[in-house]
Amino acid sequence: MKKVFLAILTIYLFSAFLTFFYDYGFWLGIINISFLIGMGLLVIGGLMKVVESGFFNGIQYAFKRFRKSTKEGSYISKFDDMDETKDVHEEYNKQKSFALTAPFLLSGSIAVAADLIASYLFYT
């Protein structure tokens, strides 16, 4: 929770600093810049979550399986060492989880939600 609070504080301090270079006003600048930073953190955290869940291991398994399903692919797979196990089902180890996945996801989603609420309250 400490990392999330620190990330949110950093987002809003950095966006407050960048509003001095923004021409449309202080509060609108804070809302827009922190929304973009929060959305970036949310996307990066989502990508980290996808990678650590082993999604790409499943894609790799599907490509190997598809290659063996054709006549030419099964013939070629006998001679190359791309598939070393020769098993029908392979177990792929899950990668270790990244330390910043949860803080990026939480701080990004909190910043995006807070900016959406603030923009609705102030500018409608």
Image (cartoon, grey):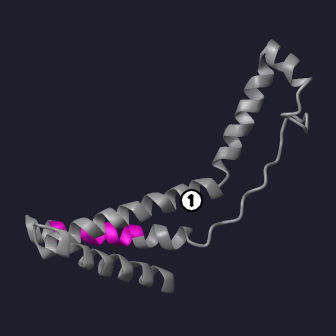
Q: Is residue 57 above or below residue 78?
A: below
The answer to whether 90 appears left or right of 32 in the picture is right
Q: Does the magenta stretch include residue 104?
A: no
**From this viewpoint, which residue is outermost toward the front?**
21
Q: Is residue 27 above or below residue 81?
A: below
| Residue at the spot 24% in from the left edge and 78% down from the top edge | 16
Please identify the quarter of the rendering in which residue 77 is found: top right
Residue 17 location (% of width, % of height):
26, 78
Residue 66 location (% of width, % of height):
73, 25
Going by the numbered disc 1, the residue's amino acid type is Met
Residue identifier under label 1: 48
| Residue at the spot 56% in from the left edge and 59% down from the top edge | 48
Residue 27 location (% of width, % of height):
15, 75
Please identify the quarter of the rendering in which residue 76 is found: top right
Please identify the quarter of the rendering in which residue 84 is found: top right
**From this viewpoint, which residue is outermost toward the left?**
124
The answer to whether 41 appears left or right of 60 in the picture is left
Q: Is residue 115 magenta?
A: yes
**Residue toward you, 82 or 87:** 82
Near mark 1 (Cα within 10 A), the count class, few <14, some 14-19 or many ≥20, is some
Quadrant in the picture for the C terminus: bottom left
| Residue 1 seen | no
Give the magenta-colored segment's residue range.
108-119
| Residue 90 seen | yes
| Residue at the spot 64% in from the left edge and 47% down from the top edge | 55
Q: Is mark 1 on a helix, strand or loop?
A: helix
Q: In this view, does 10 lie above or below 59?
A: below
**Residue toward you, 53 or 11:** 11
The answer to whether 97 appears left or right of 90 in the picture is left
| Residue at the spot 78% in from the left edge and 55% down from the top edge | 93
Magenta span: predominant SS is helix
